[in-house]
Image: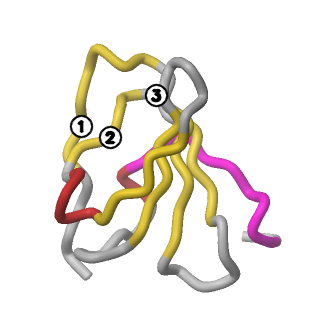
Amino acid sequence: MTGNNVRTRNVNMIDIGKGDVIEVKGSWWQVLKKTVADCGFVSLGVVAWPITKGRKSFRYISGAADYKRPIRMDR
């Protein structure tokens, strides 16, 4: 990783713990801030990158919203 603007399309490679804050952009670009405990699933094919310098916050822009994939909570 060369900085906090590195994007990845493989959501399973991102370490996300329970209680982390994520931002999900909907179809009409409203931003929904949720904790991982509230969300638990992200859309398949999303683009994700950190929104802070730490590993506590991630932003998800959803792609194919019809398919869901669970977030790994092994941290």
Q: Residues within 10 Å of mark 2 (few under 14, many from 20)?
A: many
Residue tagged by mark 1?
A: 69
The amino acid on which the numbered mark 3 sits, given as a three-letter code, is Gly
Image quarter in which the N terminus is found? bottom right
Magenta segment includes 62: no
Residue tagged by mark 3?
A: 45
Which secondary structure, mark 1? strand
Q: Earlier in the sequence, mark 1 or mark 2?
A: 2
The amino acid on which the numbered mark 1 sits, given as a three-letter code, is Arg
Main SS type for the magenta part? loop
* Left or right, residue 49 beside residue 63: right
In the image, the segment drawn in magenta is: 3-11
For the residues bearing labels 1 and 2, Cβ distance under 8 angstroms: yes
The amino acid on which the numbered mark 2 sits, given as a three-letter code, is Val
- Residue under the point 24% across and 29% down: 68
The relative height of residue 2 versus residue 25 in the rendered view (above or below) is below
- As measured in the structure, the alpha-carbon distance from the residue carrying label 3 to the one carrying label 1 is 9 Å
Q: Nearer the viewer, residue 33 or 61?
A: 33
- Residue under the point 43% across and 56% down: 33
Q: Residues within 10 Å of mark 1 (few under 14, many from 20)?
A: few
- Residue under the point 60% across and 85% down: 54
Q: Position of residue 7 (x, y in %)?
A: 68, 49
- As measured in the structure, the alpha-carbon distance from the residue carrying label 3 to the one carrying label 2 is 9 Å
User: Residue 37 appears in which quarter of the rendering?
Assistant: bottom left
Q: Position of residue 39 (x, y in %)?
A: 23, 51
Magenta segment includes 5: yes
User: Residue 19 appears in which quarter of the rendering?
Assistant: bottom left
* Left or right, residue 63 beside residue 34: right
Residue tagged by mark 2?
A: 42
